[in-house]
């Protein structure tokens, strides 16, 4: 699965399709990601990189190949945005 050229909103859709019982603490960040194109965008007063890192910190219970691939890509984007 190639995620490099996907918008954050597209990645959020992949998460929703794969993670059947999304952790309640990850839901607001997943909802926010669903409105963003890039990690450089803002969600109201929050930066996109904050949304991504908060999602990742609340997505520890999401497992599997898709989870590993998505988390790796989100981490890559977060590191590249620093």
Image (cartoon, grey):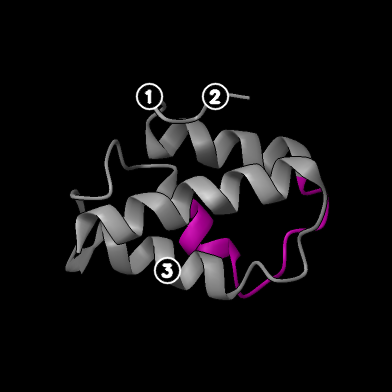
Part of the protein shown in magenta: 19-31
Helix, strand or loop for disc 3: helix
Q: Residue at horizontal 42%, vertical 27%?
A: 6
| Rendering coords of residue 64 (x, y %) | 82, 49
Residue 62 placement, left or right of 81: right
Q: Are marks 2 and 1 in contact (CB under 8 Å)?
A: yes
Q: Are marks 3 and 1 in contact (CB under 8 Å)?
A: no
Where does the C terminus fall, quadrant-wise?
bottom left
Q: Is residue 41 magenta?
A: no
- CA gap, disc 2 and disc 1: 8 Å
Residue 46 sits above or below residue 73 on the image: below
Q: Residue at horizontal 70%, vertical 49%?
A: 67
> Upstream in the sequence, badge 2 or badge 3?
2
| Rendering coords of residue 12 (x, y %) | 53, 42
Residue 12 placement, left or right of 68: left
* Badge 1 density bin: few <14, some 14–19, many ≥20, Cα 10 Å: few
Q: Give the residue number, with chain letter if any, for mark 1.
A: 5
| Rendering coords of residue 2 (x, y %) | 54, 24
The tag on residue 82 is: none
All told, the count of numbered labels is 3
Where does the N terminus fall, quadrant-wise?
top right
**Would you say residue 49 is visible in this rendering?**
yes
**Would you say residue 32 is visible in this rendering?**
no
- CA gap, disc 2 and disc 3: 20 Å
Helix, strand or loop for disc 2: loop
Q: Give the residue number, with chain letter if any, for mark 3.
A: 53
Q: Give the residue number, with chain letter if any, for mark 2.
A: 2
Residue 5 sits above or below residue 19 on the image: above
């Amino acid at each position: 699965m190639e995620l490099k050229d996907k918008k954050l909103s597209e990645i959020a859709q992949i998460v929703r399709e794969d993670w059947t019982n999304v952790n309640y603490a990850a839901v607001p960040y997943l909802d926010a990601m669903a409105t963003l194109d890039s990690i450089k965008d803002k969600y109201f007063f929050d930066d996109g990189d904050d949304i991504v890192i908060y999602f990742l910190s609340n997505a520890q219970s999401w497992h599997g190949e898709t989870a590993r691939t998505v988390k790796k890509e989100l981490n890559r984007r977060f590191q590249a945005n620093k």
